[in-house]
Structures are given as C-alpha cells and as structure tokens.
C-alpha cells in the first residue's frame, strides 16, 4: 500500500548546487504534506510543510512545491550543503477529526559532496 | 526549544517478554502517536491517541500492543509478549492541534531488539 512514493532511493549533488527531491501520492484525501530529514539512529526532524491550499512554501534554503493535479510534490534545497546529507522523507496526512496520522514514503538518501 | 523525549534509547529483550517504551511529548501538545521503522523500511503508523483514548490504530497494532498516558506527561507503548519481528525503531510523536498545523514532532526513538 504505497500511498506516498519516493521513487528515487538516492540522490547525489555537488555542494552549492540545487537538490530536488520528489514525492508522489495517490490518496486524494491528503491535504497536508511534510518533509522530514533523518539521520541514522535519530528521529525524523521536521523541515517544511505545505497545506493543499497552497502550491509553494519557502523557508530559507528549503522550498516545497505542490502540484495537486499531478499529485506530486518536490523539495528544493538551494544551495545544497554537506550537512544536508541525510535521508529525506515525504509524509502526508488527511486532516479532520482527531487523527492526523502521517503516511510516509520510503525516503531518499541525499548525499551532498564537497 | 521544547522537544519530545524517549526512554530508553535502546532496549534488548528476550522473545515473549513484555517491554514498555516511554515518551514525554511536548508539554502543551494534545495528540500523541507511535510509529515504528523496521530496518531498511519506511516509517509506519502504529497508533494515535487523543483525549485519553485511541483515535486510530493500524493493522500492526494488535492485541499485544497497548498505549497509556498514566500521569498527564508520559505516554507509553507496551508490547505484552514480544516477537522477533517487533525488532525496530519506535518513534513517539506529538502535535498541539491539527486544526491548522499538522506538524508532528518526533522523539529520537527507542531501538528495540528482540532476541
């Protein structure tokens, strides 16, 4: 049951260049999307989110784009830094009620080379 | 900055034993969650908890699992009789309210190893 898909298991970029991580979803009920960064043996760290009423959200070097018609979102990191090297998870939730459980993708390992 | 904490960081147990994983969510948060990540797999939802009761649970969360918020600060996950396949990282998460901000904040995790 892959409602959230991250089709690239890994991505390698040079320091200073743009990193683009992609995520697709199938559940039309999802209305809130988040990106988390995770290091080995640590918990996911929240990076940036976007509500389905927007198509772009920016926070410093991180920008998330949402294309609802394509059920696609992407995370742009500009400029990429070696410290950005980690696994990036896309997650989604369907709002309403008292439950906002997250459905995660499998993650993309980003390596930023100095 | 407030954060979610979890103890222990690593728990080793024998198959069939009971384990209790502990979490202290961010103090003014109202919704609490447990997730797990088996090595090499994605993070999976186990259970959500609100207003002192379970809101939703996944297929993974069978009768061997239970959750409790015993004292208004701790949030625990109990596995009654552990199986080998319960070996995973277990993450606790919390949010204040889902009305406009569904951002869940995660703890550092407990690595459970069942031998």
Image (cartoon, rainbow, N blue to C red):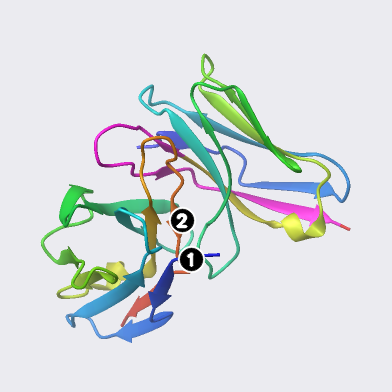
Indicate the quadrant containing the N terminus of chain A: top left, top right, bottom left or bottom right. Answer: top left
Residue annotated with mark 1: B3
Residue B66 percent location from the top left of the image = 16, 65
Q: Which residue is at a point 81% across and 54% down the rendered structure image?
A: A81
Write the start and end of the magenta stretch as one range: A92-113
Whether residues under marks 2 and 1 lie with C-beta atoms below 8 angstroms apart, the answer is yes
Q: Which residue is at a point 36% across and 56% down the rendered structure image?
A: B29
The chain identifier of the residue carrying mark 1 reads B
Residue B10 percent location from the top left of the image = 41, 81
- Precedes in sequence: disc 2 or disc 1: 1
Q: Is residue B89 above or below residue A10?
A: below
Mark 1 lies on a secondary structure that is loop
Q: Is residue A66 above or below residue B97?
A: above
Residue B9 percent location from the top left of the image = 43, 79
Residue annotated with mark 2: B105
* Labels 2 and 1 within one chain: yes
The chain identifier of the residue carrying mark 2 reads B
Residue A88 percent location from the top left of the image = 60, 49
């Amino acid at each position: 049951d892959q409602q959230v898909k991250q089709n690239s298991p890994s991505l390698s970029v040079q320091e200073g260049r743009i990193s683009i991580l992609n995520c697709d979803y199938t559940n039309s009920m999802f209305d809130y999307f988040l990106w988390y960064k995770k290091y080995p043996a640590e918990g996911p760290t929240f990076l940036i989110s976007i509500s389905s009423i927007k198509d772009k959200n920016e926070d410093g070097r991180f920008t998330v784009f949402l294309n609802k018609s394509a059920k696609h979102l992407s995370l742009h990191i500009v400029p990429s830094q070696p410290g950005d090297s980690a696994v990036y998870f896309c997650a989604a939730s369907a709002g309403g009620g008292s439950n906002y459980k997250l459905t995660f993708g499998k993650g993309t390992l980003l390596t930023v080379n100095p | 900055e407030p954060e979610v904490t979890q103890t222990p960081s690593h728990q080793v147990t024998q198959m069939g034993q009971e384990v209790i994983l502990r979490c202290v969510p961010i103090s003014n948060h109202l919704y609490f969650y447990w997730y797990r990540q088996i090595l090499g797999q994605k993070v999976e939802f186990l259970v959500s908890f609100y207003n002192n009761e379970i809101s939703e649970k996944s297929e993974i969360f069978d009768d061997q699992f239970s959750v409790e918020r015993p004292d208004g600060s701790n949030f625990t996950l109990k596995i009654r009789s552990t199986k080998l396949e319960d070996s995973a990282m277990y993450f606790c998460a919390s949010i204040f309210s889902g009305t406009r901000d569904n951002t869940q904040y995660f703890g550092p995790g407990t690595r459970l190893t069942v031998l």
